[in-house]
Image: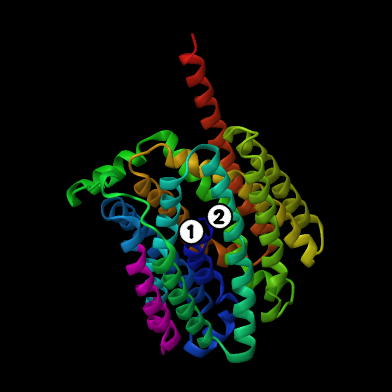
Amino acid sequence: MSFLVAAMTWIAPFSLSTYLPSFPDIQASLGASELDMQHSLSYYLWAFAAMTLVYGPLSDAHGRRPVVLWAFCAYAIASIVCALAGSIEMFLLGRAGQGMAAAAGLVIGRAALRDVFGGAQARRVMSTVMLIFAGGPAVAPIIGGVLQDWFGWRPVFWFLAAFGIVVWLIVFLRLPETLPPVARVRVPLSRVGHVYRDALTRGRFLALVVMTGFNFGGMFLYIAASPFVLYRHLGFEATEFWRLFVPLMCGIVLGAWSSGRLAERIEPRQAVRIGYGVMAFGIALNLMQAWWLEPTSFNVIAPVAVYAAGMSFAVPNLSLMALDCFPCQRGMASAVMSAFQLGSNGVIAGFIVAWAAQALPRLALVDAMLFATSLMLWLWFARRGDRGHATASP
């Protein structure tokens, strides 16, 4: 089950980062600007975020399996549109289509896991998925860099179309339906808005959603800025994107593996505290290197890898806490989480990266601001929870 869900969720990071080494070539081929290329990230993420709000209720009402199969068919078509694009407008349309379709894998995969597993086992399996998922952001730009170096940018999107077809086959052959008809919740279209409004007015749930999104956003900032960081600040080439993404993968793998191993020994809140401690250490290192040291691959990348380790230790626990706020509508809860995460990442890619990536101290400062916001929310959440337990005690 972990492998199946990880395969479904791999669609998202592959769509996001496989084409990053091709930015200069796409820009020259389609007569685009740097801002257009950043919009190719933000359009993908905003379309992704919008569709998560659709896939959640759909999968709660009709089951997980049929929704994700239709979505992956659409993903392959959108990837072909990108491969054949003759203008930046057509390319951006294809990217938005990829985002609309790829959202199904993340939303439905996370909900399907929670359908099947509970308690410490759910935490362990969620960490295993993150462990497998971590390979996506690392492997994708390496493959993209090789394809770009050998063939140019269009075969990158033919590869993504083929990848979508392969994942569709895996899901079709191996994924069982995890939500039986008796457990399905059909929300009338007129009530969908009310359901989401109810979710967004629950302070504890909303805090967990923002924490999860901003924690991931601190790492995504460097993924979105990777063409600037690697080409402009470090002087690397298309085939050297592994220098950033492999350390990130190692950090995510270490954090997720540790979280899974300790799932039955420590409470979720304790795990989150440990994760925040590691993230704080990574942020401090990043600020110091950005302001005081000359940029080298080790100085720039190692602190981000440390941050990624703490993030992947904390996020599985935060995600499960958020899903458990709505035990009968986990698809909806997963949709809200994904919508915020991807929507905020779209804002980062569309409005922040082009400015922040001009100088490494700017990137480090924005990273620290995202983390500080998440940390303050966690301190509020922890204090509120502790008061609740104290009040309930005799």
Q: Position of residue 258 (x, y in %)?
A: 68, 46
Q: Nearer the viewer, residue 323 or 52?
A: 323
Residue receiving disc 1 = 5
Circle 1 Cα neighbour tier, 10 Å, few/some/many (<14 / 14–19 / ≥20): many
Measured as percent of width and height from the top left, residue 60 is found at: 30, 50
Helix, strand or loop status at disc 1? helix
What residue do we see at 74% from left, 77% from top? 235
- Tell me where the magenta segment starts and ends, as one range: 68-92
Identify the residue at image location x=22%, y=48%.
Answer: 186
Residue to which mark 2 is pinned: 129
Q: Is residue 113 depicted above or below 73 in this figure? A: above
* Residue drawn where x is 61% and y is 56% of the image: 131
Who's the residue at 41% across and 62% down the image? Answer: 103
Magenta: predominant secondary structure element? helix
Determine contact: label 1, label 2, CB under 8 Å: yes
Q: Position of residue 230 (x, y in %)?
A: 69, 72
First in sequence: mark 1 or mark 2? Answer: 1
Q: Is residue 72 magenta?
A: yes
